Image (tube, helix red, strand yellow):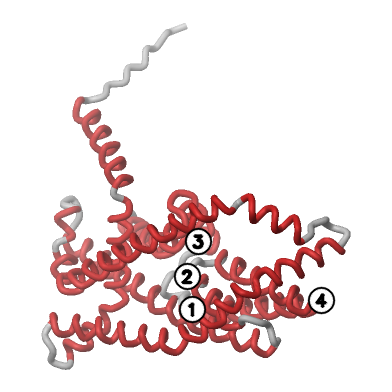
Amino acid sequence: MNNKNLTIEISLKSVFSIIAIVLFLLLAWKIRAIIFALVISIILMSGFSPLVDWFQKKGLNKVTSVVFTYLFAIGAFGLILFAVLPPLITRSLQFAEDLPIYITILSDSLNNSEFIALNSEDVARILSERAQEILFEAQGLLLNVFSGFITFITVAIFTFYLLLEKEKLKNNMFYFFPHLPKDRVTLIAHKIEEKLGAWLRGQFLLMVIIGFSTWIGLTLLRVEFALPLAVLAGALEIVAIIGPIVAAVPAIIIAFVQFNNPIPALGVVALYVLIQQLENNLIVPKLMEKAVGVHPLAIIFALLVGGSLFGIIGAVLAVPIAATIQVILEDIHDHSK
């Protein structure tokens, strides 16, 4: 029997390359908040680019076009807030006032059922025991609000400069990939920009449609707090697949507690199922199929990975990042033939 010795040689260059990659990943993890802000800015830049281009075609210079685009976006957002925010605040405050009553009714209903024994005293005791924890979480929320404001300003500045320099950035992307032809890198960057922009615009329109449809349906079913629930449903549409399921839960609970009857709650379930069926079979194919084109299983996997690693922001960015990776993989596949 011949004994063969297997010799593995690792060059010094390979060792340094591995160390450099590990250090880069550690640095990226440390500054992940900045990276997230940059990714969001790139998505916003991709979404706003057609409007900037339209203003430039009308004869405005680039800086003025970007400023007008910002003013248009701020105006549209302000108009939505002006229409939705006052009644939303009123109904949300009313819900906060009525919450103890809802808890009592829900606990009494559960206590009278054969599934679980829970009464209002139990609920009050649990809330009392968690009072300090809730206070600590509230303080953390204030810090998060301040951090979110700083992030908002950072994203706005990033997006502004990206819109100003987008063509230069796309044309110079090949410096990061010197082994690839310049035209190929520029084409990939253009495809990614188109896909991200189409996703953002389609997602915004989808959120508005779902929110409005939910508000109409809950109003017809005479469910309390239809507007806050509809805003929640529209906002959670940005988290693909999982968001609509989460949005349905509070509406079902409120309907059950309000009428103290499972029939209206089943009506709310039917409403959300109907809206989701219309979304999946009619709205999404028209708005998002060409924009994203990512397989549902890939979306679920991306959501699980993004949510596990980075929380809600990872879940929100999972789909556009998956779409970007798909563009790159398609280009690799096309050029490997």
Can you identify the residue that label 1 sits on?
207
Residue 42's image quarter? bottom left
Looking at the image, the residue that sits furthest to the top is 1
Residue 327, numbered label = none
> Residue shown at 28%/49% (left/top)?
31
Residue occupied by mark 4: 261
Is 229 in front, or is 129? 129
Within-10-Å neighbours for mark 3: few <14, some 14–19, many 20+? some
Q: Horizontal placement of 31 versus 160: left or right? A: right
- Residue type at numbered disc 4: Asn
What residue type is disc 2 on? Ile
- Camera-near label (1 vs 4) is 4
In the image, residue 151 sits, relative to residue 255, either above or below, namely: above
Q: Which residue is mark 2?
A: 238
Of residue 59 and residue 86, the one placed in the foreground of this image is 86
Mark 2 in CB contact with mark 1 (< 8 angstroms):
yes
- Ranked by sequence position, the earlier of labels 2 and 1 is 1
Among the two numbered marks 3 and 1 on one chain, the one whose residue lies closer to the N terminus = 1
Compute the Cα span from label 2 to label 3: 12 Å
- Tell me the SS state at disc 4: loop
For the residues labelled 2 and 1, the Cα–Cα distance comes to 7 Å
Amino acid type, label 3: Ile
- Amino acid at the residue labelled 1: Met
Label 1 or label 4, whichever comes before in sequence order? 1
The residues tagged by marks 3 and 1 sit, at their Cα atoms, a distance apart of 18 Å
Read off the residue under disc 3. 299
Q: How many marks?
A: 4
| Precedes in sequence: disc 4 or disc 3 | 4
The image quadrant where one finds the C terminus is: bottom left
- Binning the other alpha carbons within 10 Å of mark 1 as few (below 14), some (14 to 19) or many (20 upward) gives many
| C-alpha distance separating marks 2 and 4 | 32 Å
